[in-house]
Image (spheres, grey):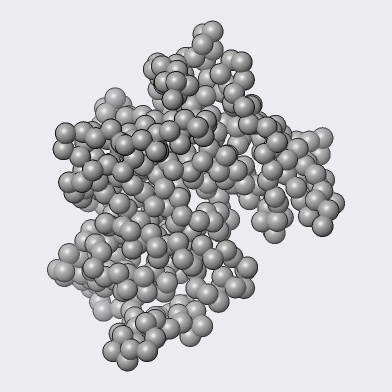
């Protein structure tokens, strides 16, 4: 606990400088007048939904900065101490449990990191970066929001085909059962995903229809024709939001004023029909429920969403708007975690996930999925810095050379980038050293 207090005192002076590219670098003054640089998130002012609705206004730079989230503790004993003790309760505490679900690579972890204001979950362009459910805790004022970041939803056929862990099938469903609100994230830059909700997502919403749900369209910055997003909303909500028929205009190229009834999945031009093995069975043994599920296979969306948001999680566009809305959904209840806890993940797990993220980004094909990570050293240096030494064990000898790269360039690049992300997570100096060895079977 004392170490955590010292680190908190050292981090009291934080300066934010906006660069021409729109990014923010956090500068933190620590002992011996050392200044460390950190990556941080800044919410952009020009959002896609604002452009569509014509409501964008100039926002002063000082209003764009959100309160800084607390650092994740790199000392497991400190974190365990906070987790064991009763949370610090405000006078009128409120709490919200939010489950974020969606297809693989929809941007769930990116959105979670943006909401938390701290990079704690791994993000990669490759699928299945998140392997199991992880909790993030956002505490502002008297409200605490618990984020349940989940793996991309897959069916049993795909999970078995790719030898995925059981968590890929169980964790999203378990998270939804624990949640007060379900946030469904859809990658609208994907030509298939914007035409219909993922079958597993639909099944999950159907089985948990009593839990309020919100639709969030992600990666809108990659969509050239912004007006087409309104048609996507009509398709994924089946024209209903909050139980009312939504009046949604089509793009200028269309001569119709309203969205026309959508065709069933498989009958649309260019959309492959859903296979029986991909949709599976739901609630077996009950004919009424089976008939209801058959109806799901012919649906493009879910007509029971409470709200719809459009944003770019990577760029930070409209994330603040979504966060403020989610905070209003919190209900009176005692906090589950201390306000200084930002995640329940052990510090070593945060480190392993961030390093694995870089491995996924820079290594081809199946190589990163077969690497075993071993922590050889984890200690606090004399200057308060975190010293980490990790060995990466690979299954084939030729993979050693690939991972190290010419003159050690690749492994050094991975260590440097992972080290910067760990600085952002722990808000302290990090010295990360990576070694590569062949693992004999």
Left or right: where 14 falls relative to 105 = left
Q: On the rendered image, what quadrant is the C terminus found in?
A: bottom right
Residue 286 sits above or below residue 357 on the image: below
Residue 221 sits above or below residue 15 on the image: below
Q: Position of residue 322 (x, y in %)?
A: 28, 47
When asked about the image quadrant of residue 166, the answer is bottom right
When asked about the image quadrant of residue 45, the answer is top left
Residue at (33, 63) in percent of width and height: 177
Residue at (68, 32) in percent of width and height: 377
Tally of marks: 0
Extreme residue in the bottom direction: 287
In terms of depth relative to the viewer, which is nearer, 397 or 62? 397
Residue at (60, 43) in percent of width and height: 352
Residue 261 sits above or below residue 253 on the image: below
Q: Position of residue 152 (x, y in %)?
A: 48, 61
Left or right: where 396 falls relative to 311 = right
In terms of depth relative to the viewer, which is nearer, 186 or 88? 88
- Let me know if residue 321 appears in the view: no
Residue at (58, 56) in percent of width and height: 126
Left or right: where 222 falls relative to 264 = right
Q: Position of residue 75 (x, y in %)?
A: 52, 30
Q: Where is residue 63 in the image (x, y as percent from the top left)?
A: 27, 28
Q: On the rendered image, what quadrant is the N terminus found in?
A: top left
Residue 340 sits above or below residue 429 on the image: below
In terms of depth relative to the viewer, which is nearer, 425 or 360? 425
- Let me know if residue 263 appears in the view: yes
């Amino acid at each position: 606990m004392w170490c955590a207090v010292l680190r908190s005192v050292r981090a009291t002076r934080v300066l934010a400088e906006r660069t021409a590219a729109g990014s923010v670098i956090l500068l933190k003054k620590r002992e011996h007048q050392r200044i460390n640089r950190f990556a941080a998130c800044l919410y952009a002012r020009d959002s896609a939904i604002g452009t569509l609705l014509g409501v964008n206004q100039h926002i002063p730079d000082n209003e764009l900065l959100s309160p800084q989230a607390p650092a994740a503790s790199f000392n497991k004993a400190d974190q365990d101490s906070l987790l064991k003790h009763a949370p610090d309760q405000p006078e009128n505490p409120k709490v919200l449990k939010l489950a974020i679900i969606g297809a693989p690579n929809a941007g769930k972890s990116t959105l979670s990191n943006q909401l938390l204001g701290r990079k704690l979950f791994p993000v990669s362009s490759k699928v299945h970066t998140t392997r199991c459910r992880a909790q993030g805790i956002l505490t502002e004022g008297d409200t605490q929001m618990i984020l349940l970041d989940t793996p991309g939803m897959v069916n049993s056929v795909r999970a078995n085909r790719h030898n995925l862990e059981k968590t890929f099938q169980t964790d999203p469903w378990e998270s939804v059962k624990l949640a007060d609100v379900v946030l469904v994230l859809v990658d609208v830059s994907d030509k298939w995903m914007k035409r219909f909700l993922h079958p597993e997502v639909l099944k999950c919403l159907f089985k948990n229809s009593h839990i309020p749900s919100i639709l969030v369209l992600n990666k809108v910055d990659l969509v050239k024709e912004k007006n087409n997003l309104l048609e996507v909303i009509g398709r994924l909500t089946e024209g209903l939001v909050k139980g009312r028929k939504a009046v949604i205009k089509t793009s200028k190229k269309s001569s119709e004023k309203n969205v026309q009834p959508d065709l069933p999945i498989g009958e649309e031009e260019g959309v492959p029909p859903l296979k029986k093995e991909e949709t599976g069975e739901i609630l077996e043994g009950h004919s009424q429920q089976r008939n209801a599920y058959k109806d799901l296979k012919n649906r493009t969306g879910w007509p029971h969403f409470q709200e719809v948001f459009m944003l770019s999680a990577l760029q930070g566009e409209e994330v603040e708007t979504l966060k403020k809305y989610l905070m209003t959904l919190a209900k009176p209840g005692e906090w589950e975690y201390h306000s200084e806890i930002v995640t329940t993940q052990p510090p070593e797990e945060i480190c392993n996930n961030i390093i694995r993220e870089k491995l996924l980004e820079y290594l081809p094909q199946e190589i990163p999925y077969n690497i075993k990570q071993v922590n050889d050293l984890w200690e606090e240096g004399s200057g308060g810095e975190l010293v980490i030494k990790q060995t990466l064990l690979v299954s084939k000898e030729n993979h050693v050379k690939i991972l190290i790269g010419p003159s050690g360039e690749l492994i050094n690049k991975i260590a440097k980038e992972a080290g910067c992300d760990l600085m952002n997570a722990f808000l302290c100096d990090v010295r990360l050293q990576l070694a590569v060895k062949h693992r004999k079977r």
